[in-house]
Image (cartoon, helix red, strand yellow):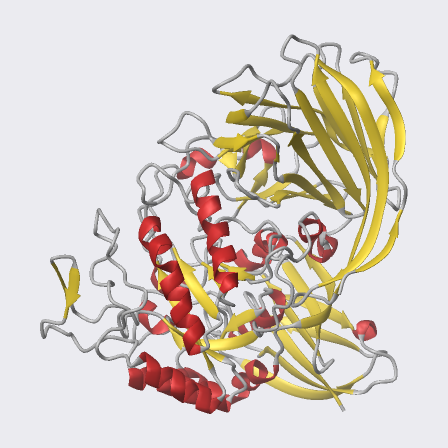
Amino acid sequence: MKKIIAILVIALLFSSCSSNNESKKYQATSPNGTIVVDFNLNAKGKPFYSVVFNNKKVVDSSYLGFEFTNAKALKDNFNIVNTTTSTFNETWQMPWGEQVDVVNHYNELRVELQETSELKRKLNLVFKVYDDGIGFRYEFPEQANFKEALIKDEHTEFNLTEDYKTFWIPGDWDIYEHLYNTTKLSEVDALQFANHKNLAQTYIPENAVNTPVTMVGADGTHLSFHEAALIDYSGMTLKVDTKNLDLKSSLVGSENTDYKVKRTLPFETPWRTIQISNNAPELIESKLIVNLNEPNKLGDVSWFTPMKYTGVWWEMHLDKSTWHYGMEHINGEWKDTGKAHGKHGATTENVKNFIDFSAKNNIGGVLVEGWNTGWENWIGFEDREGVFDFVTPYPDYDINEVVRYAKEKGVEIIMHHETSAATETYTKQQDTAFALMQSLGMHSVKTGYVGKILPKGEYHHGQYMVNHYNNTVEKAARYQVAINAHEPIKATGLRRTYPNTISREGLRGQEFNAWASDGGNPPEHLPIVAFTRMLSGPIDYTPGIFNIKFDEYKPDNQVNTTIAQQLALYVVIYSPIQMAADLVEHYEANPKALQFIKDVGVDWQQTTVLNGEVGDFVTIARKERLTENWFVGGITDENARTIDVDFSFLDADVTYQATIYKDGKTAHWDNNPTDLEVETLTITKASKLSCNLAAGGGFAISLIKK
């Protein structure tokens, strides 16, 4: 239940001010006074802002405006006709998440602008200044002389004052599945990846980066640029001017129109966000992105239960089994012509095996991929519309029997919908598919959008697909279905408004370790992800691989971490659904390590980031909601290191039995990744502990109340 603590009155500052009166300051300051946003117009009536943090300017004068295909640009000749400031302070509660209570406290500056030219179009700018950063957006109010905006591009600048150390992926219009680069801002070169072919769907048109993009300054100032509340708009990339250290918004477009966004007035843009902190841990603890979204519109979502899950998934990436059964596509229908190859993974028998294992090991769900018709050669089809059927199972998968058996064992089946990016087919079938799920008591679905978007000419991150992803979430909610989207649009905090948005991929995931030809995800990958991609929202990374080398399946591939780090990821990389991704036989062969997966929570009352440096290491402690037990996870990059854990975050006057899963003395991500030691200690709030992490290693601790 949302609790309003205080809402202070709005104060009128001034009205009808001269556009070139730069002696006046139009300003908003964070509640603790460390962040200051200044706004003004230059002599030509161009709006600009700047940001000061700890008395140091971190964003210099940065201009704002729009370019249209159906109207003159909206970027200068403005007057300030009115400004107001206000303060807002509330505490709201997450139905699931990294914590229960979220403080939403900011000071706001609202600026109303009007052109001095004949059109006299109106544009409002709203700045919200928090202790952990800022968000600002444009508002296009209803007006007689401006009915429809065909936005060619948005010109929002972030003019930086330092050549920051920058952690970035290229501004790809189709995928986020790139490894992170670490360079100075002046050395960003996204175009070097323009010919990168990954799943035949990447498109990088300019030297731009995708968000969140995180930067670290010489004095330890940390900045991360992103957006919040991305609704009926195009995703934003940031073009990099390496000479002038300037970022400028560049919206994802379409080959089918000469504009990138089409909106009817009145409307609001997404929030443009800058998370600002003194150190790396504070970035992870920031709730700026979710706070800038509207409150829960769904009400009670207790029908969704955060859970761990297993599933028919990893075995296909290892080539142990396949998604497809061996049917033939004849006259628009899939027919069983007796050519089944016998390697199909989603069989009734195989899924029951996962159900049995999950029921025994405190794992609440089983994901089943490849259960439905349409998987035969689907990637190679030019016209994929009509290929997948989201209600018809393959002949060897009895969906009703599987669901019956799962319910008997207390396990929920997680549905899978791979759309092959054929959006019209999926849209047409959604009501039927979600109704089937509802009738079977399924409340979670993993959606996928592998391939070039259909209709042709659209991109994964353009306005067309932003609306498709969001409409899918809203429709699913009507059937009490939660969405875990893969090949998605970026997370922008909409999980607050639509809490059935439970998780998503949106990064280079675990599966790249199984089949990528470049060696998989290097040890530095996740210590960067924690401070970049994870700032936007939950990640379905699919941790828990115990058979690190998998030589019996793919001797040229492996996971580039130790097994201790795989355990730590259940705490470090947040999601309300966490997969135990490996094969059942690999878990049963290592009961010592499996115990942590059985014990660890997925839904948290409180989160504390104990330490960390972007790209190097991070340690996070989380308190489980139901049990109030604590769990700690720490990971490192390719460098071995010692991390000291101070347990002062624990509850007072409580004694815990701590089980510590740590790298063995000879552990190494490549040379000896499965060397694991387990130690049991008694821990209290006064305790301290030093943990030695191997290269690519980690540690995990369960703290169970005695």
* Whether residue 82 can be seen here: yes
Q: Is residue 97 above or below residue 450?
A: below
Left or right for 174, reference 165: left
Left or right for 285, reference 540: right
Instruction: Tell me the residue at 53%/26% (across/down).
Output: 148
| The image quarter in which residue 62 lies | top right
Q: Is residue 120 above or below residue 299?
A: above
- Find residue 687 and report its horizontal and vertical position in percent: 82, 79
Instruction: Tell me the residue at 75%/36% (across/down).
Output: 127
**Along the viewing direction, whichever of 1 and 445 lies nearer the viewer:** 1
| The image quarter in which residue 314 lies | bottom left
Left or right for 656, reference 148: right
* Whether residue 588 can be seen here: no
Instruction: Tell me the residue at 72%/81% (across/down).
Output: 629
**Along the viewing direction, whichever of 593 and 106 lies nearer the viewer:** 106
- Find residue 159 and report its horizontal and vertical position in percent: 67, 28
Instruction: Tell me the residue at 56%/72% (across/down).
Output: 304
Q: Quadrant of the N terminus?
A: bottom right
- Find residue 315 and report its horizontal and vertical position in percent: 34, 73
**Along the viewing direction, whichever of 324 and 416 lies nearer the viewer:** 416
Q: Is residue 20 above or below residue 103?
A: above
**Along the viewing direction, whichever of 115 and 299 lies nearer the viewer:** 299
Q: Quadrant of the C terminus?
A: bottom right
- Find residue 560 and report its horizontal and vertical position in percent: 46, 65
Q: Residue furthest front?
A: 144
